[in-house]
Image (spheres, helix red, strand yellow):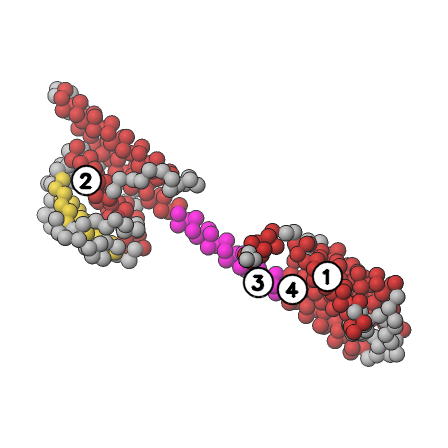
Amino acid sequence: MIDRRGIVERWHRLDVTVRDLPFGVLLLVASLLPALRGQGTEIGGLPTRPADALAGVAAVLQSLPLALRRRWTIACLALVSLGFVVDQLRGYHLFAGTALPIALISAGSYLEKYRRTTLVAASVAFAALSAELYRRGPGEAPIEFVSFYLILALTWGIGAWMRSARAAEAERRSRVAEDARNTERARIARELHDVVTHHVTAMVVQSEAARYLTAAPDRLDETLAAVSDTGRRAITDLRHLLDLLNPDHGTAEPRTPPVGRVLTLVEQTRRAGQPVEFTEEGTPAAATGSSDLVAYRVVQEALTNALKYDHGAKTSVLVRHGEREITVEVGTDGSGTGAASPGGSGRGLVGLRERVDVLGGEFSTERPAGGGFVVRARIPGGSGGSTA
């Protein structure tokens, strides 16, 4: 069985001159056929004369240089024009004369430099040819030469339009690629913000607490161990994040399941001195796209804010896995303190809102009258399951 796709792929891998050559050869062969003799372009009214050796030269000059029309465009146009001049002045009227409009379309489409100079030179050459044909011929009306010139100008214009269309498409693709890069940069920036802010905040809070535990060696050792564990988790998360920039990303070991990651996050926050009550309802799906990661980031940012602005307050975390969505609710009762807060950039909640909005969900924050705060998020993409 013929592998047509393989043939097409091999054909497109060939140099453009090789791919353009067959058309020129076909035009040359057509010019040599007796049935097409004298059936080419004719301007000036000169009588058709029998082909001779110079006719063969004119046919070659008008047809084979078409192989150069994309690689050496000016050379192609110059050679084809020279062959056309010989063809018309000698009265061969070869079928290969149809190559001139093709060469002009190619020049308008592919020529990058000296476009105006080429256009002026071609116009001057055509004016000289018209004057000579008018002198030699039976006195054709000048309108014939003007009409043919306008046809040639139109072919150049078609090529110029094709060039503009290609440039517009290339610009569109460039904008799409740039938008994709900017989106990816913003996503990575949000991931870095979430990872660094949470872990560093926990380490700062734990380090602050360690200052007051010098008289209790056991608790001091436990607190310092928590700082070390938090640092190691931060490094692990950063490595996973930086793997996204690695072309071989996806070959590494799979990450911790969403449930395990949230439990680890809650336990880490507890070790930083924040009493957290964690409740999970429903059964997580085996695959939820990016919704489980967004839910994790909502919990992470909310617990980070709890450590910053309501440290020591009773904190609740609820994650509910529904049939078509994941619901997250994190809140504090306002009984803590923000004295240990290292400050923030203010972009965490904004970034979370953007993430949830992208998935078509809902995100809200609230400050109850009694103090504290509540963060709620509804993220499409959950799964069915029984309530645990």
Earlier residue among tags 3 and 2: 3
Give the image location of residue 127, x and y in percent: 81, 68
Q: Which residue is mark 1?
A: 24
Question: Between tags 4 and 2, which lies in front?
Answer: 2
Q: Picture coordinates of residue 331 (x, y %)?
A: 15, 46
Q: Which residue is mark 4?
A: 159
Q: Nearer the viewer, residue 357 or 242?
A: 242
- Can residue 350 be seen from the camera position used here? no
Residue 243 lies, in percent from the top left, at: 38, 38
| Coordinates of residue 89 in the picture (x, y in percent) | 86, 69
The amino acid type found where label 2 is placed reads Leu
Would you place residue 29 above or below residue 373 in this image? below
Measure the C-alpha gap from mark 3 to mark 2.
55 Å
Residue depth check, mark 3 versus mark 2: number of the one nearer the observer: 2
Number of labels in the image equals 4
| Drawn side of residue 33 relative to residue 318, left or right | right
The crowding category of the residue bearing disc 4, from other C-alpha atoms within 10 Å (few below 14, some 14 to 19, many at least 20), is many
* Residue toward you, 13 or 203: 13
Q: Nearer the viewer, mark 1 or mark 2?
A: 1
Q: Are marks 4 and 1 in contact (CB under 8 Å)?
A: no
The stretch of residues the image draws in magenta is 161-184
Q: Is residue 306 left or right of residue 7?
A: left
User: What secondary structure predominates along the stretch shown in magenta?
Assistant: helix
- At mark 1, the secondary structure is helix
The amino acid type, in three-letter code, at marker 1 is Gly
Q: In the drawing, what numbered circle is on residue 263?
A: 2
Front residue of 38 and 181:
38
Relative height, residue 90 to residue 329 (above, below):
below
Residue located at (23% from left, 40% from top): 261
User: Dot 1, how many residues are within 10 Å of its Cα: few (below 14), some (14-19), or many (20+)?
Assistant: many
